[in-house]
């Protein structure tokens, strides 16, 4: 992949290539859709979701940050990652804020602290627990009550919003996902590609084989393989789908 495309797939540069076309103003005024974006770790869901949300003036929600927040708090409190009752109590009682620039739990800014290999593992562990999922899914659904939302995760099109207006499932080769993850400045950890790829494969395995809401593409999702595709092209493809949907109303 050329260096310039690699830059575009990184979180911090995600809007650079976008310009508001005049049609954006009309799109903002139309029906408020629910757009679900699922896919494996490191595929660039966040970059695409943020760009689409910015184009449409919608809220972007990274549902994975909620699992990370619960995993972070569990480690802080020394709660075992298999203690389902305690963890679901913790998920119920905690205040979790997610905005475009901030993730906070009980008022503590954990935006950077949750992007570490340790929290990758803790989040994957708590995400296996059905009672924790039920609580976080409830919160996610409430965020989507009025539409106008782009939510990314693993089960958004299958469980959280099975009625979503548009479901996307992004995929890419593990090598490409490892390159994107290693160049993601928001995520700390190893930069050796082989090590990043191994960790991604472990998480893919955990996320797609767990009993509770495993990762898979909804039957009515549009599957996009982004391997070798610049993010601007993926965003343009998705925006074409959104326009078609809105114009059909
Ligand atoms: O997208 P992410 O890597 O930040 O997600 C962190 C973990 O949470 C990951 O193991 C997948 C899991 N997750 C999930 O099970 N369901 C979601 N809707 C979002 C994330």
Image: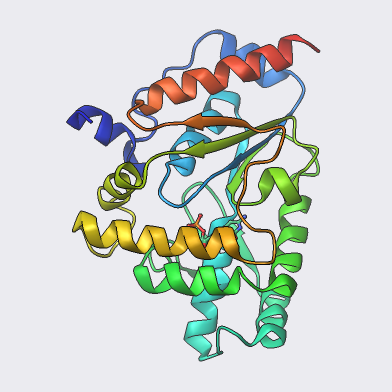
Can you tell me which quadrant of the image ligand 1 is in? Answer: bottom right
User: Is the residue 118 above or below the residue 175 in the image?
Assistant: below
| Quadrant in the picture for the N terminus | top left
Q: Is residue 198 left or right of residue 207?
A: left
- Residue in the image at 58% along x and 62% along y: 209
Residue 140 pos. (x, y %): 71, 54
Closest to the observer: 112 or 67?
67
Q: Kindly indicate the quadrant of the structure image that contains residue 126.
A: bottom right
- Residue in the image at 51% along x and 30% along y: 224
User: Is the residue 165 above or below the residue 174 in the image?
Assistant: above
Residue 42 pos. (x, y %): 40, 49
- Residue in the image at 35% along x and 63% along y: 199
- Residue in the image at 27% along x and 65% along y: 189
Residue 211 pos. (x, y %): 68, 67
User: Is the residue 8 above or below the residue 24 in the image?
Assistant: below
Q: Kindly indicate the quadrant of the structure image that contains residue 166.
A: top right
Q: Kindly indicate the quadrant of the structure image that contains residue 164.
A: top right
Q: Is residue 25 visible?
A: yes
Residue 131 pos. (x, y %): 74, 74
Q: Is residue 106 visible?
A: no
User: Is the residue 82 above or below the residue 44 in the image?
Assistant: below
């Amino acid at each position: 992949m050329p260096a310039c495309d690699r830059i575009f797939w990184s979180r911090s540069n995600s809007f650079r290539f976008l310009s508001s076309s005049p049609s954006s103003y009309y799109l903002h005024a139309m029906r408020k859709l629910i757009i679900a974006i699922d896919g494996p770790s490191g595929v660039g869901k966040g970059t695409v979701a943020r760009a689409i949300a910015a184009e449409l003036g919608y809220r972007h929600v990274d549902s994975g940050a909620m699992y990370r927040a619960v995993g972070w708090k569990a480690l802080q409190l020394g709660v075992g990652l298999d203690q389902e009752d305690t963890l679901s109590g913790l998920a119920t009682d905690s205040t979790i804020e997610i905005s475009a620039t901030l993730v906070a739990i009980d008022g503590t800014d954990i935006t950077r602290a949750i992007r570490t290999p340790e929290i990758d593992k803790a989040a994957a562990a708590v995400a296996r627990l059905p009672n924790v999922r039920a609580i976080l899914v409830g919160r996610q659904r409430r965020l989507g009550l009025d539409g106008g939302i782009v939510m990314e995760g693993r089960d958004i099109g299958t469980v959280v919003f099975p009625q979503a207006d548009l479901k996307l499932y992004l995929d890419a080769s593990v090598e490409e996902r490892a390159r994107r993850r290693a160049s993601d400045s928001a995520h700390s950890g190893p930069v050796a590609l082989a090590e990043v790829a191994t960790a991604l494969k472990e998480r893919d395995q955990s996320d797609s084989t767990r009993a509770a809401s495993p990762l898979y593409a909804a039957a009515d999702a549009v599957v996009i393989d982004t391997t070798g595709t610049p993010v601007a092209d993926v965003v343009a493809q998705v925006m074409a789908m959104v326009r078609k949907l809105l114009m059909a109303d």
